[in-house]
Image (cartoon, rainbow, N blue to C red):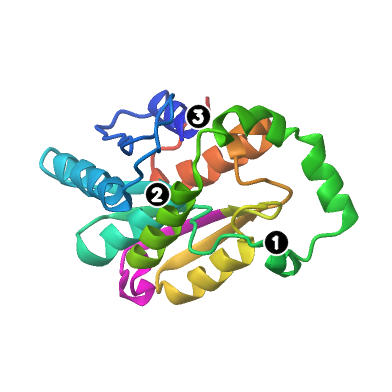
Amino acid sequence: MEPLFDYLKSRYEFDYEFPVYPGHGTVLNLTEPDGDAWYAEALHAYKNLKERVDSVYIIGFSMGGVFASHIAQHESIDKLVLIAPAFEHIRLSRLGRLNLTPAHFSEHMKMHLYQKIRKRLKDIPFKAYQEFKRIVEAKSGSLEEIKTDTLIIHGTLDLLVPSISSIEVSRQIPSARLELIEGAPHLFAFTEAHQLELNIFTERFLFPEEIRLV
């Protein structure tokens, strides 16, 4: 989320909360994962911000997208951005849902994403993955109850969360619109062009009356 945040903060003035889930951050410590504590951190950030400002925009990425949608179902927010929200995760047995061709896999391999994240992968125990699945299921809720203007952004080359899940989610949220970024992986920040597209889509949605040309 930092590249998107840095882009918006360099162009606009706004107050913010940037929650870091327990055990996450620069150094991972997920030996005792607690999904409820992860969600509580997101909700705490919302409540802190709500006390200081008149309008609240929430941006959630992956698991954070699920948390953001849950907050939107129960709290008052003005705009909601869901980036590759992890309502569904990819199982090897369901890769067919992605409709990927050999060319797609080739393009994904060219990004060298595994080499970039493998040092962090070794610090994620299996029980953390299980806790992720549990809390995502618990916090998905009833998306049709979200009345907030919502933007959903997803990459078509996401091998962790299928873009088709965001297509389905966009049909459930009454005031949602969907932007699919062609060829983008789950981790937008590792591809400069796709990160720029993400930045622009988000900016146009959040600040339509204030967009700067420089």
Residue corresponding to mark 2: 64
Amino acid type of disc 2?
A: Gly
Q: Is residue 151 left or right of residue 135?
A: right
- Judge depth for marks 2 and 3 and give the one in front: 2
Residue 22 magenta:
no
In this view, 165 is above or below 51: below
Circle 2 residues within 10 Å: few <14, some 14–19, many ≥20: many
Q: Is residue 113 left or right of residue 211?
A: right
In this view, 26 is above or below 135: above
Q: Nearer the viewer, residue 184 or 196?
A: 184
Instruction: Please give the name of the residue rendered at 71% of the width and 29% of the height, measured from the top-left corner.
Output: 115
Residue corresponding to mark 3: 3
Instruction: Please give the name of the residue rendered at 80% of the width and 60% of the height, measured from the top-left corner.
Output: 100
Amino acid type of disc 3?
A: Pro
Instruction: Please give the name of the residue rendered at 53% of the width and 46% of the height, measured from the top-left corner.
Output: 201
In the rendered structure, are the residues bearing label 3 and label 1 in contact, judged by CB atoms less than 8 Å apart?
A: no
Residue corresponding to mark 1: 92
Q: CA distance from mark 2 to mark 3?
A: 16 Å
Question: In the rendered structure, which segment of residues is drawn in magenta?
Answer: 140-153
Identify the mark nearer the N-term, 1 or 2: 2
Instruction: Please give the name of the residue rendered at 48% of the width and 51% of the height, measured from the top-left corner.
Output: 129
Q: Can you tell which quarter of the image residue 21 is in? A: top left
Q: CA distance from mark 1 to mark 2?
A: 23 Å
Q: Nearer the viewer, residue 157 or 10?
A: 157
In the rendered structure, are the residues bearing label 1 and label 2 in contact, judged by CB atoms less than 8 Å apart?
A: no
At numbered mark 3, what does the secondary structure look like: helix, strand or loop? helix
Image coordinates of residue 84 in percent, x first then y, are: 53, 53
Identify the mark nearer the N-term, 3 or 1: 3
Question: Which labelled disc corresponds to residue 26?
Answer: none
